Amino acid sequence: MASITLDSVTKRFGDTCAVQGVSLSVPSGAFLSLVGPSGCGKTTLLRMLAGLETPTEGEIRFDGEAIDRLPPGRRDVAMVFQSYALYPQMTVAQNLAYPLRKRGVPKAERATRVAEVAGMLELEPLLQRRPRQLSGGQQQRVALGRALIREPRVFLLDEPLSNLDATLRTHMRREIGDLHRRLARTMVYVTHDQLEAMTMSTHIAVFDGGQLQQIGSPEDVYHRPANRTVASFIGSPAMAFLDAEAEDVGGAAVLRLAGHIVAALPRMPARRHMVVGIRPEDVRVADGGIAARVIGVENAGHEAIARLSTTAGDIAARLPAGPAPRAGDALAILPAADRLHLFHAETGARLTLNPRAPSAAVAPSALGHLQD
Amino acid sequence: MKRSAILGAMRQVSTWMLILALATPLLWMALTSFKPESELFAIPISILPEEWTIEAYRLLIEETAFLTYFRNSVVVAAATTMLVVVVGALGAYSLVRFRYPGREWIAGLALVSYLLPSLVLIVPIYLMMVAAGLANTLASLVIAYTSFALPYSLWLLRSFMAGVPEELEAAAMIDGASRMGAFVDVVLPQALPGIISTALFTFILAWNEYLFALVLVNADAQRPLTTGVMTMLVSGFNVEWSLLMAASVMMSVPLILVLAFLQSYLVRGFGAGAVKG
């Protein structure tokens, strides 16, 4: 169990910079997810934590102790690989016992620990089999068991669920979450699946292009994304980004989107032009709202996701159960004003303006003005 | 249905005829070694010896230097095999796993050196051995055979080791193994079929080699079987046929044993899936 600190860690492979000046810190017992698109540097970062790569610059500390120069075996970490990386010539029992054997744990104690872990992960009937005789889910459990058996300071998991089918993935997601709560160990989890990150983590670090975009709780990155990159990566279906203008209407700052005043702003921003991000669940059907045409509908039963086209751009809307619209239908929609995300039009950084619902005095007159 | 049965039978017959054709000289060698001298050139030819005798074997073992040659051959073949497997495995691992300038170049050069005919190499190697003071020693043969077998072994083992996922090693190192430990625990078992093929290839080469043994070793006590038996039993005027046949049988036995023993391992290692997906 250990806290993890990264201090301006950079990794270059020749001319390419895989990880660029990453600094972050999580407390002992945290579940940190590293998320981002492929090639964003998250796996390189994990390999640096494991000791499989050495940082070009910067320092990594566990519990304040620099571990950069320690070989992998002396960092007291355990890792679960995407491919599971089970030793093919060894039985399940031998695979589980290997980390203990390498650390000189006596045979009798090894057997006890193997039995314990096998019991915890329901592997008892498989102990004498070899990895190739196991299903994907079973191999996954053996890989987890091999990581658990040693009770390391830090668990590293590299996309461990990506080779499983959907049902098993949901099941294992819950199981890993339970394990984390039960063991209260620090875990670092790499995934490109934002749902896994959202459901299991205490901390999420979003990467893009080798740079840390944001680190925070799942609520933080979902509700207060630091920039457009984070906002577009977290949440499914993705947030829609539409161009909007700030305007001064009778001395009050308002936000105009597709010809409609959709929110009041606390003050006039320095730049009038900005990008507004809208999550699907923050869109409702409202008479007199922005005119939209339905492009397509995905009906999941308990809800329907409608893809809509407006004059400001395309947007997804999460509609409650009930008769869903059909492609080609015309709708009027309004976003929830206080849940809009405002971003700088060029840099994509989050603007520190808290939009709220436009006052009744402003909205109708402005709408009326437009309709003239 | 009937036609396929006929075809099957024909295939069986032709297979057995082929096997028989290939086995006849070996069989003849073995049968001749048990015949007394008087029967060797008897007309009509008898296939089975009329009188079975192990006189040729007794003479070889008790009255000639056969056992010395045999011991020399075992030492040379075993030492060469060990050297080639150890150096080849470590070299191939280095070529596969580490990044350093000239890596591909070294691999290519190894292959080119394998393409050189041994006749081209024989004089330089002889001169080098003399200069190094190794002429007339078993060590000179071990070095010469290693230089032939190593390039091929490097290439063969390289392809086997390239097939071992790097993640397996990474996992072993995180689990507490050193790099060498990971190599022994994880890479070697995965490359075992390749290592056995290499060992077989090298052992057979070293056991059967004649030309270099003839040139590099002239001291009788240091000769391996190939040149030893030839100089002992084959002279310009006379060939000791029954002794030669007995010697040939005894020379073949170790190879047959080695093949029979390793062949089962050769098949066993294949198809072991390590990584899913």
Image: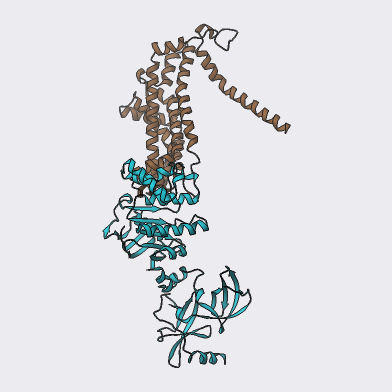
Chain colours: A cyan, B brown
Tell me the quarter of the image containing the N terminus of chain A: bottom left
For residue A212, which quarter of the picture?
A: bottom left
Q: Between A213 and B228, which is closer to the camera in this rendering?
A: A213
Residue B57 sits above or below residue A361 on the image: above
- Residue sticking out furthest to the left: A65
**In this rendering, would A28 be left or right of A191?**
left
Q: How many marks are shown on the rendered structure? A: 0
Residue A269 sits above or below residue B57 on the image: below
Residue B109 sits above or below residue B53 on the image: below
Q: Between B192 and A353, which is closer to the camera in this rendering?
A: A353
For residue B162, which quarter of the picture?
A: top left
In the rendering, at what x and y percent does residue A322 appear? 59, 74
Residue name at image x 48 percent, y 34 percent:
B266
In the rendering, at what x and y percent does residue A75 appear? 31, 53
Residue B238 sits above or below residue A36 on the image: above
In the rendering, at what x and y percent does residue A94 appear? 40, 42
Residue name at image x 44 percent, y 37 percent:
B192
Tell me the quarter of the image containing the C terminus of chain A: bottom right
Q: Between B97 and B173, which is closer to the camera in this rendering?
A: B173
Do we see residue A157 in this rendering?
yes
Q: Between B208 and A68, which is closer to the camera in this rendering?
A: A68
